[in-house]
Image: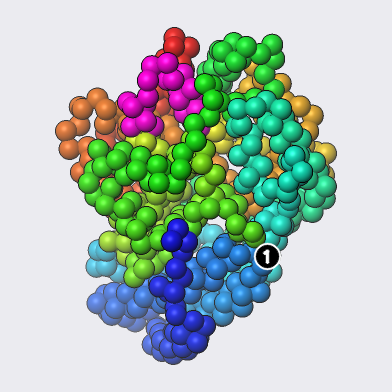
Amino acid sequence: MMQWNLEVFFKNTDDLDLFISNLKEQVSKFNASYNAKLQSLKSSEFLDAIKEYENIITSLNKIMTYAYLNFAKDTTKGSFLAKYEEICTKLEEEILFFMLEFNEIDDAKQDEFIEFCKDYSYILSLSKKQKAHQLSFKEERILLRTANTGANAFSRLFDESMARLKFHLDGKELSEEEILSKLSDSDRNVRKNAALSLSVTLEQNQHLLTYIYNMIKTDLKNDCELRGYELPESSRHQSNQIEKSSVDALIKASENSFDLVSKFYDKKRQILGLEKLYDYDRYAPINGDSEFSWDEAKDIVLKAFGEFSPEFANLAKRAFDENWCDVFPAPNKQSGAFSHSAVSQVHPFVLLNFTNKRRDVFTVAHELGHSIHQHLSYSVGTLNSDTPLTTAETASVFCEMLVFEYIKNKTPKNELAGLLAGKLEDIFATLYRQINFTTFERLVHAHDGEISSDELNQIWMQESKKMFGNSLILNDYYKIWWSYIPHFIHSPFYCYAYSYAQLLVLALFGLYKSGKCENFVQIYTKFLSLGGSKSPKEMVEMLGFDINQEEFWQIGIGEVKKLVDEFIQI
């Protein structure tokens, strides 16, 4: 079928509304039983309470997942999403007291609950650490109630606006996903015209996109000031359970190896026989761009996953057979790709916009990596399965490497240069480009007051040129390409997590291929199954690495250098 069947959540809106009615009763009873009473509870009673709290959160997730996936498939359904966002917000208000009150009880009682509730100890400890940034119940209630008319509203406006944009190329109207796929066409004129078409349409909408970004920027500034965060990125580091110093080390190590990007593109220009390489040549295929049907992509992914782990292959097969995936571009469908963890009673949901490119095969592997991770982490429950971004991207990028290795082993020597080039471009996009994104965001959010389109354009070009050096010419129109990046809108300072994951995965994959860790598959599967129930540092230590050491990042960069050297030698 290759489309989601959302009836696995609710058969119809009557079924949904009955579910909500029952949930309202449950929430009301929970509030009456525990509000303003946590201090007097026995440890066993608190354990019952947090289990019930988790069940309510799971039910809310079920409703919101259903509403959001309907919107992702058809962005004209904004009013449907808004209706159930409002319902869930009001229900969240009634349970908002629970974690706030947990942080208000005395330390001895908190520690008693943390010690007794073994399955929730880490989550409760994290909550305790966040106490300094917690506001009063009334303030938190106001922020919760107004969230859907603040940053969330502008995120929705961004999604709806981008889904409606049309890009003109060769007499046809293309979606964002389709025009972006043309940037890797084997015909240079097609790539150039696609880049121009993308830029023209973005420029026509730049006022709107700049305004949306300013509202996201202002909303984050307000939140940080209210909660006492030092920097706009501080709350992201806290949720990622990582120190700013570690992120700084990651950025420094990455920027110090930008020369690898220049070496690669200098060689690629020679291979392509071009005097100069432009931005629209970045993804020019070497030896032509291989086309893959959906069935071929599925077969590759299943075999690649199967060589690593039968469990990975079985979960991927379920994803294909049970319609976890919505595969092809469609009118008003959200662009890009994602895997939504949904709820354990159902399964993860993968959105794709498959256009038969080789890069699409890796996207399938990437998103299925997320879905496998999400499915495995169901075992630790809803509260513990919320994985920090720093480790959430690890499974996805690792699965990309599995598919790359599989394809590489099947590729004739005379076609290896093209395959290696494609993989290195993906690594650069996941590692170095995300570092550019992060330094761009740092400068944007450090700007005092609203920022103009011209200032955004200038910062974007400044940071982008750092990565490419003199190996690639960025045309003037490239300055507005910041405006279609969704993470800047949906999740400020998300992007370094991709870089983190890319280097971590390269280190882990090198360990796996070396054979030095005989039970690697078992340890790695356990790593994913833990979800967010342990810190990233503890989890990575299971595989013998220390993320707080600068030397750690050099391991991954060393693997990138090996691939660049291999490409140059070929």
Residues packed near mark 1 inside 10 Å, few (<14), some (14 to 19) or many (20 plus): some
Most foreground residue, 177 or 106: 177
In the rendered view, tell whether residue 247 sits above or below residue 22: above
Q: Position of residue 315 (x, y in %)?
A: 30, 53
Q: Vertically, is 505 above or below 49?
A: above
Query: Magenta includes 363?
Result: no
The residue depicted at 74 percent of the width and 41 percent of the height is 169
| Residue 127, placed above or below residue 484 | below
> In front here: 19 or 197?
197
Locate the N terminus and report the quarter of the image it occupies: bottom left
Q: Nearer the viewer, residue 125 or 76?
A: 76
Say whether residue 332 is visible: yes
In this rendering, position of residue 483 left or right of residue 428 = right
Q: Position of residue 113 (x, y in %)?
A: 30, 69
Say left or right for 28 vs 70.
left
Left/right of residue 255 with respect to residue 348 in the rendered view: right
Q: What stretch is highlighted in magenta?
A: 404-426
Residue, disc 1: 153
- Kindly identify the amino acid type of the residue bearing the numbered disc 1: Ala
